[in-house]
Image (spheres, grey):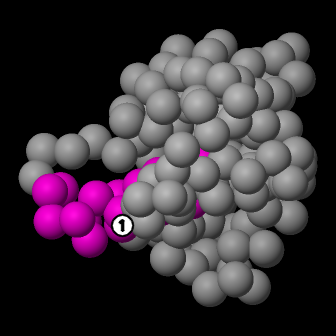
Amino acid sequence: MVSVAQFSALAPSAPAARLAAADVIDAVVGWAPDDRIEVIRSGFPAGVVAHLAERMGWTKERAIDALKLKRSTVLRKIKEHRRLDTPDSERLMAVMDMIAQVEQMVTRSGAAAGFDAAQWLAAWLDAPCPALGGRQPSDYLDTNEGIQVVRGVLAQMESGAYA
């Protein structure tokens, strides 16, 4: 597991960015709020987009579209092994948090064996959602308010209040 200090010390060079991207997806969810804010402000290595996409079963391009990232900017930053800006990093963190939210929901239900929360979330984000008037949850990932709406719908699903 990557610590905040290890993550912050990583230069966005190719090997370090790949290491950070692979490890940080699981690590950041458990960090303290101040540490998470520090990481968001310093920016995720752009390569995290590709690793998150792979974990979710999406293409890199689908992740860029779903997260409402600027395609040319993200692809350039990936190629140049640079970090994302704060708003883009915030959206990545939100999706990582949603994966953790789904994992916790399924664990609490007692049916976690063999369940892949990241892949389930990707499919759910791309499907029309009755609770959102038939819109796809991924349509809401471009604002903090929209992200809160999506997280609220996930919480309603667990409570049985989902419509």
Residue at screen point 13% across, 44% down:
114
Which residue is at the front of the view, 31 or 16?
31
Quarter occupied by the C terminus: top right
Residue 64 in sight in this render: no
**Residue 67: x %, y % from top left:** 73, 32
Query: Is residue 110 inside the magenta stretch?
Result: yes
- In the image, what residue type sits under mark 1? Gln
Query: Horizontal placement of 24 versus 43: left or right?
Result: left
**Could you tell me which secondary element the residue under label 1 belongs to?**
helix
Snapshot quadrant of residue 116: top left
For this orientation, the residue located farthest to the left is 113
**Residue 155: x %, y % from top left:** 53, 61
**Residue 138: x %, y % from top left:** 68, 30
Snapshot quadrant of residue 86: bottom right
Residue at screen point 18% across, 56% down:
112
Residue pointed to by mark 1: 104
The span picked out in magenta is 95-112
Residue 105 in sight in this render: yes
